[in-house]
Image (tube, rainbow, N blue to C red):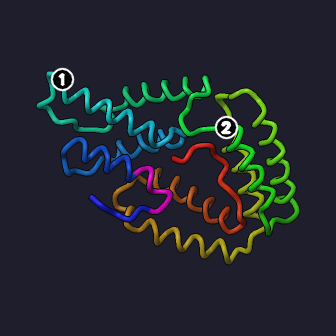
Amino acid sequence: MSRTLVAETAYYQTIEEFFVSRRGDPLFVSNSDWLLIHKWKTEGLPLRVVLRGIADALDGHAHSWSRRRKVGSLAFCRAEVEAARERWQRALQMGEEPGLDKRDQLLSLAEELLRATGLRDAAARLASDIAAELRQMAEAEPQHSLEARLQQREAELRAALTAQVDPELLSRHEAAIERDLAPYKERMPGKVLEQIREEARTRRLFEACGLPRLSLFAL
């Protein structure tokens, strides 16, 4: 299976393709499976952690007494994905997450916020405030709520940007997003599609203003 993935559908489609290929069945995932992926994504679970859990679940199935029975749903992998989540969270607590240097990433995000051009008034002040907060976070002990706090601040910045951006630009963004989503509208539940729209709006708006997405994890 090979499709061109837009940024916001890549998480969903990569999981679908990996699960379908490992399961050995050409059928696409179901609506309930899309909603389970949606849950993992909204919880901020990195893509690599989900794929590790799926691989562990299907490897275990391949060596079990029930291996002749096909795995019918992504829900079969839920327990192993949760186990992979727990290992990931322990690694974060101990500062052992591969490829993640929290301090450097937070400082880099702060610098990018301060370098952004085209911000005015409330948006400019908010970007400066967030940069200062990120620098404080960089020197603090790791917190479970760090990613959630980044998402909250990103939402605040997006609201400020939306208030200052030309409505014509927002309209062009909407049209482009709908074109990108056209191939997926018949396959994904409305709840998932709306989340993808929101993420696409944020990405396009932040790119137009030269701003980084506020996250430590590439999902």
Within-10-Å neighbours for mark 1: few <14, some 14–19, many 20+: few
Residue at (51%, 47%) from the top-left corner? 219
Within-10-Å neighbours for mark 2: few <14, some 14–19, many 20+: many
Viewer-nearest residue: 168 or 154: 154
Residue at (75%, 54%) from the top-left corner? 157
Magenta span includes 126: no
Residue 106 appears left or right of 215: right
Residue 192 x %, y %: 46, 51
Closer to the eye: label 1 or 2: 2
Residue 73 appears left or right of 185: left
User: Looking at the rendering, in which quadrant would you find the N terminus?
Assistant: bottom left
Separation of disc 1 and disc 2 at Cα? 39 Å
* Three-letter code for the amino acid on which mark 2 is drawn: Lys
- For residue 162, the mark is none
Residue 81 x %, y %: 40, 31
* Three-letter code for the amino acid on which mark 1 is drawn: Ser
Residue 108 x %, y %: 72, 49
Judge whether 95 appears above or below 37 on screen.
above
Magenta span includes 11: yes
Tags 1 and 2 in contact by the CB under 8 Å rule?
no
Q: Quadrant of residue 133?
A: top right
Classified by dominant secondary structure, the portion drawn in magenta counts as helix
Q: Helix or strand or loop: what does disc 1 sit on?
A: loop
Question: Which residue bears the numbered disc 1?
Answer: 64
Viewer-nearest residue: 29 or 7: 7
Residue segment shown in magenta: 6-12
Residue 24 x %, y %: 19, 44
* Image label count: 2
Q: Helix or strand or loop: what does disc 2 sit on?
A: helix
Question: Which residue bears the numbered disc 2?
Answer: 102
Residue at (68%, 44%) from the top-left corner? 105
Residue at (48%, 29%) from the top-left corner? 85
